[in-house]
Every structure is written in C-alpha cells, then in structure tokens.
Image (cartoon, helix red, strand yellow):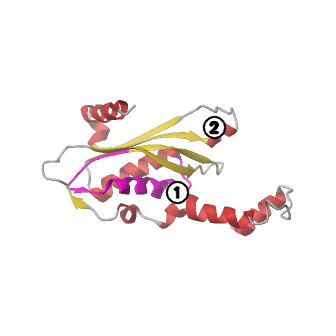
Amino acid sequence: MARAVEDFLRAAGLSLQDANLVNTPQRVADAWMCEFLDGYARTPEEVLGKTYAAPKGSAGEMVLVTDLRFHSMCPHHLLPFTGRAHVAYVPGGRVVGFSRLSALVDCFAHRLTLQEDLARNVASALSRVLGSPATACIIEAEQSCMRLRGDKQRDAVTHAEAYEGTLRRDGPLRRELWARLGSRR
C-alpha cells in the first residue's frame, strides 16, 4: 500500500524528496490499515463481545444510545464522511454493554461503505447477534463527496435510517424512537 501511495504521489508530479512527503507513503498506509479499513478484520460477534441476560421485566423496552461519533470512507471517491449514529434495540433476551454499540458502528464504519449500508449493517447485526425483535440505526453525516467536490454543498447533512423487525412495521414503536431522538436536542 505504501508503494502504491508513493506511485500516486509521483503520478501527481510531486517529489518524494520534499521534506513533508518523505514518510507520507507509510503514514498513509498505516492510517488506512489501522483506522479506515480495520473493520474488515472484525466481526459483529467479536465487537459486541459478551452478552448478558436481559433484565427481568424489560421485554419490549427500548435501549437507545445516541450521538455515537464515527468516521468512514465512501467507496465511490475514497473520501471520508463523519457523523453521528443513533442505535436502538429492544432486547430479545440478551443485552450488551453500551460501549459495544459504538464498537459495532465502528466495525462497519471502518470499511469502504455507503452511509445507507452502514445503517443497514448495524441494524441487521443487532437483530441477528442479539436476537432482537426490533432494531434501528439512524445516521446523520457530513459527506466530503458532497462538500468538497461537484456542487460543493458545504452545509449538507445526509440522513440514512435502517430498521429491522417490529421497528420496521410498528408505527407507535417507531414514533417512540423518534420522540426520544427529538427530545435530546
């Protein structure tokens, strides 16, 4: 990867003798492997880790963690997007620690992915791994693709949402989720 970055810089007409570019190929390779693409090396089961029995009497009660900051990379232009994920699930007998939900978002965000797929993968993994009857992932992001190129919509914020199980079909449950999200502002 470092060799490819070196070739890219040379193809752009830049001198690798420039003091600012001397170690750039290796720094870029390290950043990509350790911070942008490391999600490929992890599975949802690994990042969610140990699960716990849901508390008695919690059936049908929603767990919601908001404003999980993330960064990802768009596969179309290899430009970053950053934002906040809001993750919700109704326990289906098992729960995880709250920080594990952030780790799940990063598991998928640290891959080349579209925002819509990121939301869908998080919601699907929660449903599958925890056996949750209702999951959701709502993502608000700032896309460099839109902000820096093309029409240069510098203030645009994109939204993607994905639902699984009863949150897909149950209007009152989804309204409850959105009421909670709206009340945090």
What is the x, y in percent for residue 72? 55, 51
| Residue that numbered label 1 is attached to | 110
Q: Is residue 184 left or right of residue 10?
A: left
Q: Residues within 10 Å of mark 2 (few under 14, many from 20)?
A: some
Q: Horizontal and vertical percent for residue 86?
A: 40, 43
Image marks 2 and 1: residues in contact by CB distance under 8 Å: no
As displayed, is residue 158 above or below residue 76?
above
Circle 1 — which element? loop
- Residue 173: x and y, percent? 26, 35
Residue 146: % across, % down: 63, 37
Whether residue 106 sits left or right of residue 34 in the image: it is left
Report the residue marked by disc 2. 146
Tag 2, which secondary structure? helix
Q: Residue furthest front?
A: 19
Task: Report the residue at 37% width, 51% height from top.
Answer: 124
Residue 133 visible, this angle: yes
Residue located at (36% from left, 64% from top) = 45
Q: CA distance from mark 2 to mark 1?
A: 20 Å
Amino acid tagged 2: Met
Report if residue 91 lies within the magenta region.
yes
Q: Residue at x 56, y 39 (%)?
A: 142
> In which image quadrant can residue 177 be found?
top left
Residue type for callout 1 = His
The answer to which quarter of the image holds residue 178 is top left
Q: Tell me if 184 is positioned left or right of 42 in this view.
A: left
Q: Mark number for residue 38? A: none
Which quadrant does the C terminus fall into? top left
Residue 126 forms part of the magenta stretch = no
Seen in the picture, residue 19 relative to 122 is either above or below; the reply is below
Residues shaded magenta:
87-114
